[in-house]
Amino acid sequence: MKQMCVKAPINIALIKYWGKKDELNVLPYNPSISLSLSLYETHTVLEQCASPGLTFTLNDLADAKSEKKVREFLTFFPFDETKEGLIIRSYNSGPTAAGLASSASAFAALALACNLYYDEPYSFEGLASITKKGSGSAIRSLLGGCVEWDTDGRIHALDWPFEDVVMGIVVLASQPKKTGSTEGMKHTVQTAPSYHDWVKQSHQDAKAFKRALQDKDFTQLGSISEANALALHAVCADAKPPIHYLNEQSNALIKGIQEARKEGLFEVYCTMDAGPNVKLLHRDKDTTRLTQWLNEHGWPEVRLSRIATKGAHRCER
Ligand code: DP6
């Protein structure tokens, strides 16, 4: 029986994607830049089965909402439910739909697994262009390291000069978010008066971020990333009615980190996505001080992650 197994890392954007200028082809209004992380991944197995139809499980449980999306995604491949039997088992090692990029790793893994299972109907570029139709940010999980997704819909690996950079994730809530990213960004594009300015600023942030990479300037890189994340939450709050992904705890943690940084305790920068969890970008030398500080202030334990050097890939045997 035919089988295929693929793994893909999550990725966290330091320059955020928020809004599609072309919904059909999933082209973003602004470039985004992310880091693929080794902490959480999706592991997806495709298996041929004798009786026709699709069976999909997520972490070994049936999930109708995800199954619907998977079925839609399979239309990019020569899968015929009336004639062919296919079992897809997907496992997320992190919390699902809590702003920790589980849909990014999930669709990157699914896209590559389907492409390999059906004997590569798509080139890498073709694969990238369909992966983003599953979820925009998933396109960046096809590659490891630091990845830019540009407004023409293509991805590029950027040279990442900081070998000692770590991303810490503080999980403040692991329940699925109230407003999904797809819906949230559409609402922001349509109703936030400051959306146009936000797009302009994001283009500038992406340029400045790449300059900081070239200059190997971590302070600059961290500052741009934190400001870019806060600007995302500000533009969401400007939507009518507003969307608030951060909760009181997230805001208190961000404030505490900023104050400790100003006092020179450590150099840690915050980034947050469509959920309340806070991710902390820093260097190895600050890990001990950061974990101590979090502990002393009663925050949940930080989960530390290195950068994943590999993007979506076939499982090793
Ligand atoms: C805040 O990729 O989940 O994480 O393309 O509609 O599936 P869709 O949205 P999605 O949005 C991610 C938004 C973000 C920022 C980012 O990852 O760049």
Image (cartoon, rainbow, N blue to C red):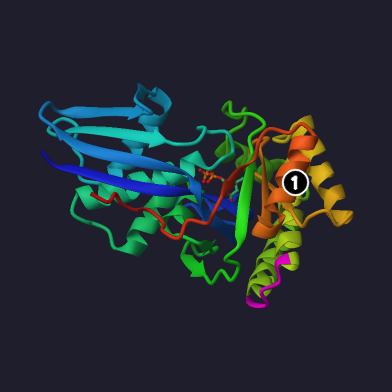
Q: Position of residue 39 (x, y in %)?
A: 51, 45
Q: Position of residue 40 (x, y in %)?
A: 48, 43
Query: Which SS class for mark 1?
Result: helix
Magenta segment, prevailing SS (helix, strand or loop): loop
**90 displayed left or right of 189:** left
Q: Is residue 278 magenta?
A: no
Residue 134 visible, this orientation: no
Residue extent of the magenta highlight: 214-218
Q: Position of residue 32 (x, y in %)?
A: 59, 59
* Nearer to us in this view, 279 or 157: 279
| Pointer 1 residue | 235
Displayed quadrant of residue 213: bottom right
Residue at x 67% of width, y 75% of height: 211
Total count of labels: 1
Placement of 309 over or under 238, stated as above or below = below
Q: Is mark 1 within 8 Å of ligand 1?
A: no
